[in-house]
Image (cartoon, helix red, strand yellow):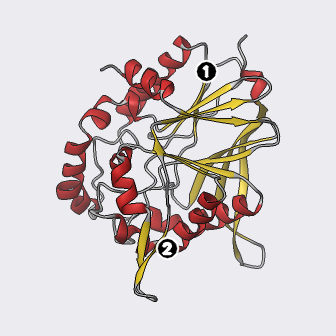
Amino acid sequence: MSSKSRLDRAYKNAKRISFDDNSKFILFSDCHRGDNSFADDFANNRNIYFHALQHYYSEGFSYCELGDGDELWENLSFNSILNAHKNVYMLMKLFHEQDRLHMIWGNHDMVYRDPIYVEKHLSTYFDPKIGEDVELFCDLKYHEGIVLEHSETSQELFLCHGHQADWWNYLFWKWSRFMVRVLWKPLNVMGIADPTSPAKNYKELIKVERRTKKWITDNSNLITIVGHTHRPRFPEPGDIAFFNDGSCVHPRSITGIEIESGKISLIKWQIVTTEDGTLKIDRFLLEGPTSLTDYKTD
């Protein structure tokens, strides 16, 4: 199956969410939440991520996670990840309880495409304080793609992880997972990166982006928002409508995409130092806000 066929299928089978100019979404991907060990890339930015997610929760945003939220290549179970970052999952639970949590699976959490696996591992967790299982993400559904459809303009935004255009990490993810667990995770201590990852292999990154852009142009320049490569992308109106929200494992910062008031923006959260030497977490606008209708082609 070609990258075109995989993207076609993800779009055709995508969960559809109606929205309007009053709707607010924050899109993050590639959190790679781990077990807080030396290989947990998320651990460095967890305070930034938690603060940002608290902001979006209090401001009434819905949260869309575009894959690779949990690092299930390096880690054997979700439980170790939950225990390492429980405050994050308790906050995500609040989004879920208000139907404001929309999840997409990527190559590093591809096991979540199996609803039975999700129900078994994410529905409940053991609370040692009371000595029994309690609810976590009951009835949570993961999707390969999500389509946001504007209720008035009928404009569509297609969200997916983006590894559909990466044949190796889509078709041979189990082999990649095995290699990461037994080889690249130990070598990570010495600074040797996994060469199969497009985020760490520039040539592969360019190929993945080129295939995705080809699919977008073949589909009437459909606004498409992905992750996977960790490289933020924000096109000008009139260009190929290929967006990338970046990742949550940049050095000392996280990037994401906001959709609010019918406009789209690329944002960054990072730790900054004030004049009196106090550290604080701030939000920065990188691109936009640009009206979604500026990308309409018909």
Q: Nearer the viewer, residue 59 or 132?
A: 132
In the image shown, does 111 or 230 lie closer to the viewer? 111
Quarter of the image for residue 266 reads top right
Q: Are marks 1 and 2 in contact (CB under 8 Å)?
A: no
Quarter location, residue 270: bottom right
Residue 36 in the image: state x and y as whole percent: 39, 72
Q: Secondary structure at mark 1?
A: loop
Give the crowd class for mark 1: few <14, some 14-19, many >=20 residues within 10 Å: many
Neighbour tally class for label 2: few under 14, some 14-19, many 20 plus, Cα within 10 Å? few
Indicate left or right for 120 with 102 as reference.
Answer: left
- The residue tagged 1 is 222
| Image quadrant containing the C terminus | top right
Question: Looking at the figure, which quarter contains the N terminus?
Answer: top left
Q: Mark 1 or mark 2: which comes first in sequence?
A: 2
Q: Which residue is mark 2?
A: 86
Question: Looking at numbered disc 1 in the image, what kind of residue is underneath it?
Answer: Leu
Q: Which mark is residue 232?
A: none
Task: Judge from the rendering whether residue 231 lies leftward or rightward of residue 239; answer left or right.
Answer: left
Q: Residue furthest bottom?
A: 129
Name which residue lies at 55% across and 73% down.
Answer: 87
Q: Secondary structure at mark 2?
A: helix
Specify whether 92 is left or right of 195.
right
Residue at x-position 33% and y-position 42%: 197
Number of numbered discs visible in the structure rendering: 2
Residue 296, relative to residue 142: is it above or below?
Answer: above
Amino acid marked by disc 2:
Lys
Query: What is the CA distance from the residue labelled 1 to the residue labelled 2?
Result: 37 Å
Q: Residue at x 52, y 55 (%)?
A: 248
